Structures are given as structure tokens and as C-alpha cells.
Image: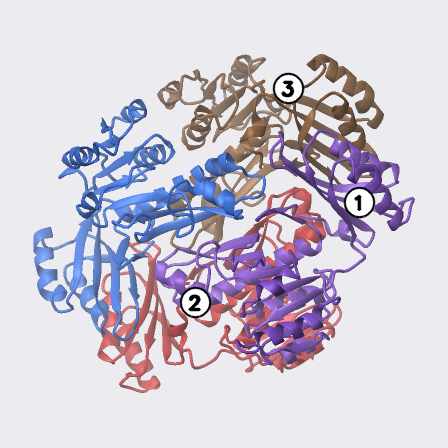
Chain colours: A purple, B blue, C red, D brown
Amino acid sequence: MPSVSTQADTTARLLIDCPDRPGIVSAVTTFLYHHGVNVTELDQHSTDPEGGRFFMRLEFQTPNLDVSRATLQQAFGDVVGRRFDMQWHISYAADRPRMAILVSRHDHALMELLWRWQRGELRVEVPVVISNHPDLREAVERFGVRFEHVPIDAATHADAEARMQALLHGQADVLVLARYMRILSADFVARWPRRIINIHHSFLPAFAGADPYQQASDRGVKLIGATAHYVTADLDQGPIIEQDTARVSHRHEVPDLRDLGRDLERQVLARAVRWHVEDRIIVNGNKTIVFA
Amino acid sequence: MPSVSTQADTTARLLIDCPDRPGIVSAVTTFLYHHGVNVTELDQHSTDPEGGRFFMRLEFQTPNLDVSRATLQQAFGDVVGRRFDMQWHISYAADRPRMAILVSRHDHALMELLWRWQRGELRVEVPVVISNHPDLREAVERFGVRFEHVPIDAATHADAEARMQALLHGQADVLVLARYMRILSADFVARWPRRIINIHHSFLPAFAGADPYQQASDRGVKLIGATAHYVTADLDQGPIIEQDTARVSHRHEVPDLRDLGRDLERQVLARAVRWHVEDRIIVNGNKTIVFA
Amino acid sequence: MPSVSTQADTTARLLIDCPDRPGIVSAVTTFLYHHGVNVTELDQHSTDPEGGRFFMRLEFQTPNLDVSRATLQQAFGDVVGRRFDMQWHISYAADRPRMAILVSRHDHALMELLWRWQRGELRVEVPVVISNHPDLREAVERFGVRFEHVPIDAATHADAEARMQALLHGQADVLVLARYMRILSADFVARWPRRIINIHHSFLPAFAGADPYQQASDRGVKLIGATAHYVTADLDQGPIIEQDTARVSHRHEVPDLRDLGRDLERQVLARAVRWHVEDRIIVNGNKTIVFA
Amino acid sequence: MPSVSTQADTTARLLIDCPDRPGIVSAVTTFLYHHGVNVTELDQHSTDPEGGRFFMRLEFQTPNLDVSRATLQQAFGDVVGRRFDMQWHISYAADRPRMAILVSRHDHALMELLWRWQRGELRVEVPVVISNHPDLREAVERFGVRFEHVPIDAATHADAEARMQALLHGQADVLVLARYMRILSADFVARWPRRIINIHHSFLPAFAGADPYQQASDRGVKLIGATAHYVTADLDQGPIIEQDTARVSHRHEVPDLRDLGRDLERQVLARAVRWHVEDRIIVNGNKTIVFA
């Protein structure tokens, strides 16, 4: 859990993904030290000390950085990145990522995100909210956020996605599906790899597909859940970011599960989005490493 | 949650399952009142106020009961049961149910049950522990409980089940599978309808079948779970009694999931068994009503 | 947990508080049955089967009620209430209670309540929101709710309370302090017995008084909490309605605790308010019985 | 959460506590790298990037360590420790800490520890269990563990503590109070600084002192808790290591709270002890940093 103070605009983060071998932490931290940087958080993970893959996230403070961002990039790649065959990138908290939201009719997940954004908990810009229904226009515009209605059905699917793509291309860094009830095409998804976050209203992999609360009621489970995950071409199969559950009983009918589930969905999606925009997540195959 | 005091040996419980219609609670409680009985707990549930099914559990104290048990039975059936087309039964906390335990090599769920039984939390008798391995004999006999080793493999399956059936028939009221790793035949299960409780080491219906912790690790879930359920002929598909989850992260490898999972399994199975032996569970189709 | 269906406008609830003795449930349910009422939920609690106090809540459906509300009231008092020396009342889901909200500057608890009210989860009317600061006027009026700014300080305390009392008298059935940071006088509180709900941002009785998140940080607790309680003349000492906790670590500085705590406060207050307006709470001395 | 594999006997841990300033991580990891060590876990925490205190825990694998333990100690102190004014120490998983247990009559916390130790979850030696009652001798000796009965009352307090001190001196590295119901003198506690772990049966700081479940019942809380903490001369005031809570209601009488609380106490104490023996805890003033 980050302290608020380290999310100041002087905070930068370095994410690293490379083959594990001795000396990585030493090389990275020594490089940063020599450039006047103070490391305030450091998390690492190795899938296996022998022949595994190594992941690291550092937060550092840049007020005393002795070079420009571009020079730092260049130097880190030359001195450290290449040596360890790293995939890496540096981001700066001052550069707010642009988060577009797709939604259908249920407003709870959308409202939760906008409300957290408005109070400064989510340090992003919100360029646009897109919906396949017009219902939520007023609720969105009240926050001073642009709303676009893009109707979509089987016949118009390709056109509608093209229109969404036109609205989003170059305007957004991450898409959040806040109960967007249409399935995006593999083609669309491929344009946003690891950059679309969905909230599914079950404890995946249980109750994938349609109407999970009905499925949960039919099976008689004693807990319901919600799952935030990255969207891939395989429906409900993408890397899981966050999950949570709530206790239910025989007294909960399907509408009660939906009521309770809304609260879960709001909390789970809000955590997942926050971790994404603070660059706390690395995707490793079909799993996530979350340095939360 | 019951108060300990109401689990005294003077406590009786009445379970009812019948078509819902007005007047049931009035008829039942009036009958009991006229026989000098003090109702100390009353739970009810209707699947639908119109044309649904009605379930009720009462606990009552019998010190002032004005008739014998047999007479009470007879009279309740004649006066109330028949009128409302009820399935019902009365049990007495003084009559300890006999709980046999089946186990393989993992001892944690078994030890948890024996320990709770020894300290009086589980008000049962334990006539026998049966295992397909000899390993846990000493651990079981230390509690003063009989241990029977019944080896079983594909070739001997029918004989082994026959031997178990011989050990259990007339000796047990409920069977608990405390990590018993062999699949019981449909024939065996049919002899113990709604009287075999299993602990599955996942959050069912996710990860049914073999090695659920490996499955959970492969899928990258952020919570693991355990599920206690009644055993039916369909593997891992029986009515769920209780479930719980625990948080995990990318740092948990499969052995860590097993470690954490053991604690979940112990807690979930212990609660399910307690509810069963206190007659708190009614099975309705493939779901349970738990008046906990 | 209620099913949504039973909260229909045809739902009525009967709350009872009386000395325990045999025959109460029988008398109550027989009375209702004879008046064409279908009981859909029944909860009871006795503090002690011998000489204790008895509490009961029933939900029943009124479409076939054979008498007027007034007649039902009269008859129940005459036939049952008096016989068992009951305190009792009947309420109807169709009569929405009027919930006034007091707030200072923190908007999260207020927004949560208004949002749940707007979507129909909280079946109340909201006659007015009163604040000692003007900041939240626009946010409140967007919901179509009246906002009144009543500044208050040590010098003007009595006058300000008189003004609030004038705004509320006859206009509200329950007051919710959604992070209202001024202490109400004993005199004011006495006018709203068991009808003021406060959310305290700690796990009471730990960290009563000012700045509980700072206190929690100083003590180094591993969980933070929130507590919804009825307000009495003794600050933070009133009957507790609901509590919850969330896990924290050494990484959470005070602002992080406030962040996390906001989510707890919203959830805990929302549950408490819902239980109150659905008449699920009976106060027994300094404790609550919650038939949730 | 550690993976089991990293707790192999080749694992070593380095704990550091020093004034924060740039370059610490670089210096430490570079030193270890140059000695053939592979760092498999690294956690750090700073109380404040400017002028704060810095804490770090590393796990590393020693198969390729190029020097003796003594030389590593010497070199680390000379090259790194002194430069940064560190308090530090290195421990080796192969050296099992010796954990003595003090208990009175309640066996649940004791049994939980012995049971986890027996199955290899707690990698310690258990030289002795000391009790002020003789009751648990057989239960302890069954595990092959020495049991010593040291009666204690007001008159004999000093003598009894002297006898315990004689039994423990040089024989134990950590003392666990597994529901030991006598208060240890300040003098005794001073001999075991940050090396006595107690389990308190409430969510401290709520309900410090005697009979917390009675206090919890009297106050009508909706959650009960348990707290594991280091023992200091101030009763129930020492640094908190771990806490957890469980939901209760008006139905739970004091004996029910004790029942439920036992499960909490077992889990919370087991986690705290495991973290201690794996050198995951650093005490900072009256708070703990737990690198779990």
C-alpha cells in the first residue's frame, strides 16, 4: 500500500521484467543512486531463483535528479537494461494517464470511478465516457466529463467499434469497462493489449459468461465475488488483477445478490484501476504480479 | 449462531419442510405452547410467499414437556404435520449423533474435528475413523478413538467399500470426509443420502476435480477458498454447506497455497459439521438452507 | 438479509419488546393469521429463557389484510400487546421514513447515502441536508435535495442548534450524522432518542474522541475500523449498530488510513441506515439487537 | 508471504535498521552480490524520505557464499554497517530458534503451536512448556516436549519467576505466552526484550485488562478480535504484531464469544509467531514493521 506522500508529483516509477540472475538489484539501485535519486519503495519478485523470471518495481523521488528524463532513459537502457536483457519503463506520477470508461446502463462502477477521480484518489485524466446507451449522459456530464453515445448491436458492431476506436485512439492510455455489457471483438482488444480492465461480477473462474448472479443463486454458493481482470480475446479468461468476496445465505435472492455484488464490484474495480494507473501491475503470461 | 446455553441437554430441535401457506407458524408454536415447551430459537424461510416451499427450525427446552417423546411425536404428526403436508423431525441434543470420519494421509482436518470433539465443542460420538492408509493410527488412537485401516485401490474398490459399509452400518449417523482422497461409488453414496460431508479445497464451483491448489495457481486467482458440501453421486456437485476464502498474491507458490488452504479447510469443515450435528441444515434440491 | 421482494410496498413490520414467557410467538402469529396476514420473515431473541427479555420482528404481507390499519393497531394492542406487557409498533414499507442528514466538509458518507437513495436502495425521503459549512451545497442540490447551511461555533452553539431543531422538527424521523464534526448538546440529543445515527471512524471503543486515524497510527494497529452507533448524551458511547475493519500495515501513513477508512465508513453507515429504516433494530439498554 | 522454497535451510536473512539516506540499498545489494549471494526477497520501509528511519529485510541463498559466516559478518559490519550507522543482524534458517511456551489452563493456543511445529510449519525447537497448572502435562508430553509445572501466586511470585528464569536462561530465544494468565514482573520482562509474544483476546487497545470477552459483550460490539503483541512492562501496551476480527451479533453470549475467539486467537498467534521466527519483524518504538 502506497503512502499518499509518495504519490506526489515528484514520484517516478521504474518497472522491470527480465530473466533472473544475480546482480540485478545491485545494478539498478547503484545506477539510480549515482543519478541523485532517492528510492522510496522497492518490490521484487522472482518466479524461481534458478532460471526464473525477475520482476521489480521501484518508486523514487526526482527532485535531485541530475539529468533530464530523456537522458535518464537513454542511460538506464545503455547501462543496465541491455546488460540484463530487460523489458522496462519509467513513468512519472506528474504525467496523469488518460483513462477512458466504457459503460452500459448500470452506473455504480462508473460513478465510483468518477467520484474517486473527482476527489483526487485516482490520479488520472478522464477524456471520455462511452456508452452504448444514452441513459448516463447527464450523470457523466455533471462531473465535467465528455459523454459519447455509441449504439451497438450485432449488425452495427464493426462500425460502432470503429467509431469508438476513432474516439479513443491517441486520447486514452487505458480503457475501463465499468459494466460494459457488449463483448469487444478480438480485433479491438488487440489494439489495447493489457490496457483494458474489466469488472466481472463473479469470483472467476466460477460463473464466467452471462448472468453470474443467477448462476451463483442456482448453485447455492455461500459467498459471491467480483473479479477485475485485463481483457484478452478469450472472454473472462484474461489475467486477474483483483478479487473479493462477500458472504451470502439462502435468504439472498438474485436481486439481493445484485445489490450486494454492486458494492463488491465498486471496491474491486477501484482497487484494480488504482494499481494500474500507479504502475503497480506487471503481466506475466496469464497472471499478474501486483506490487500493491 | 447458537448460544452455548441453548445447546444444553434439555434442548430439542424441530425441523420442518412443507409447502408454504398461511398459518404454519401459528399452528406449530401453538401446539408446542400447549405442551409446556419454551421456544428459544425460531428460524424460518420461504422460497416464495406465493406457492413456495416453507422451511422452519425451532429450538425448544423440554424440562416442562408434559408428555413423553413418543407421545409428542405422535401428536405433532397427527395435529400439525399431516395438516400442512410436512416433512419434519424432532431431535434431542442429549442424543449425540455418531460421526464417523474417513481420511487419507492429510491429518489437519481430522485433527481439527477430534480436537473440537475432545473439548466438547462438537457434541457427537466418534465410533470410528477409517483410512485407506495406516499412517494416522497412532494420532487417532491417542484420542481414545477406534482406527480402522481399509486399503482401497481400483482392483479392490468394491470390496473395500463393502468392508467400510460393514464397519459403518448401524454405527454412524453421519460420515465426514476429512480429506479422504478416494472417490466413493454412487452405490455407497446412495446409502448415506445427505449424510456424507466432504471438504473440497477450492471455492466451488471453481477448480472442481483434482489438485485445486495447482489449478488456482495456474489461473492466478487472488483468493483461494474451501467448500464443505454434502456428497452426491456427482463429484463436487453436491449441496454447498459452507465456504470461505483467504487472500493470496503472486508470492504464493503451490505449497504456500496448501499451507494457507489447510487453515481454511479446518475452519470451514468444522463449521459445516457443527451445523449438521446441531440440525441446522435443511437440503432443498441442490441447495442448503442453513439456520446458523 | 432481506430479499428485495419482501421490501415491497405491501410489506409491514411488527417489532416487539417484552418480558419473556411462554406463548408469545403463538399468540402473535395466531393473531396475525386470523387477520389474513402472511408472515414472510420472523426473527426472535431472548436474553435469557428464564426471566429474560424477549424481542421479535415479523415481516408480513398486507394485501389480504381484513381490517384497516387503525383497527389492526387497536386489536393487536387489546388482544396481544396488553396480555404480554409489550412495547410494540407496526410500520409499513409504503410509508417512507424521512431521513435528514447532517454533514460538515467530508462528503463521502453523504454522497454514499444520497446515491443509494437515488437508486432506490434506501427507501426513504430526504427532506433536508444541513451542514455547518457551505461547501457541499451544489453536490446536494444536484440530487434535488434541499441544503441548509447552519454555521455553528462555540459562541453560537445554542442558537445554531435551535435553528436546526426548527428545520427538523416534524420534518424528519431519523437524523444521520454523515461525518458531522460538531458535538450535539445533550439537550438536542434528548429530542431524538434512538433516532440519531452517527458514523465514527474507528473500531469503538478503541480510539473514541478526536482524530481516531492519528490515534490508530500512533498505536500501530494492524486493522482500522468504523462504527455506526446511535447517539446518546455520552460521546461515542451510544449503542453500536454496525462495525467493520480493514487490514493495514506499517506502510499506511495517516492519510492512507483516511483513504481506506472512507470506504469502511461508507459501507458501515449505509448498512446501519438501511437496517434502521427497515425497522430491523431494537435497542436494549446500551446494546442493539439487529434482525438483519 | 514467503514461498516455502525460500525457507529452505540454505536461506539467510539480513535485517537492517538505520537512519534513512540515499545509497543504502545499492551498498547492501552490491556487497552481497560481490560475495556470491542471490537475493530472493527484499523489503524496505522508510518512515520518511527526509530524515526518517530506514528498515530493510533481505532473504538470500547461501549455497555459493564465498566466505564463512564469521567473515561475512565481519565484512558486512566493516564495509556497510558502520558506514550507514546500522543496527543489523543476519540469521540462518538452518539455525532453528528455540521457542519456549508459557501456558495456564486453556490449551487451544498451545495445541495450535505444537501442532504446526510438529508438521514443520513452524521451524523452531521447543525446549520446554511451562505452566502454572499441571493440567496440560500429558497433552504436551505426547508431542515429545518437556513440560514443567511452576505454580505461581502472589506470595510465591518472585520465586516462581526465578525458577522459570532458571529453566529458560540460555535455553530459549523467544517466549510465547499462549494464554498464560499471570502477569510477568517488569523485571522478568526486561530480561526478554522484544522476545516475549503474547496473545490478547481482544482487538487492542479496546478491552485491555481482564475478561475482554465479558467487556465486549457488555459494550455490544459487532466484531470481536484478537491481538498478538510483544510484551513490555506496560500491560497490554506492547508493540502489536498481528490482529484479526470475527463478526458477532446479539445472539452471541459470552461463552459463544469465547468459542469464536479461540479460533481467532489460534490463527493470530500462529501468524505472529511464524513471522517472529522467520525474522520478519522489526520493532520501531512502540510499533512493528512486519515484512510478511
Label 1 packing within 10 angstroms: few (<14), some (14-19), many (20+): many
* Tags 2 and 3 touching, CB below 8 Å: no
Q: Label for residue A256? A: 2
* Tags 1 and 2 touching, CB below 8 Å: no
Up the image or down, A271 lies above or below D202; here it is: below
Q: Secondary structure at mark 2?
A: helix
Q: Chain of mark 2?
A: A
Label 2 packing within 10 angstroms: few (<14), some (14-19), many (20+): some
Q: Label for residue B249? A: none
* Tags 1 and 3 touching, CB below 8 Å: no
Label 3 packing within 10 angstroms: few (<14), some (14-19), many (20+): few
The x, y position of residue A279, in whole percent, is: 71, 51
Q: Chain of mark 3?
A: D
Q: Which residue is mark 1?
A: A60
User: Left or right: where does residue C253 sit relative to residue B101?
Assistant: right
Task: Please name the residue shown 34% across and 59% down the image.
Answer: C45
Three-letter residue code for mark 3: Pro
The x, y position of residue B127, in whole percent, is: 20, 33
Which is closer to the viewer, label 1 or label 2? 1
Which is closer to the viewer, label 1 or label 3? 3
Q: Please check whether the numbered discs 1 and 2 fall on a single chain.
A: yes
Three-letter residue code for mark 1: Phe
Up the image or down, C132 lies above or below B103; here it is: below
Q: Label for residue D63? A: 3
Q: CA distance from mark 1 to mark 3?
A: 32 Å
User: Left or right: where does residue D112 sit relative to residue A38?
Assistant: left
Q: Secondary structure at mark 3?
A: loop
Three-letter residue code for mark 2: Asp
Q: Secondary structure at mark 1?
A: strand
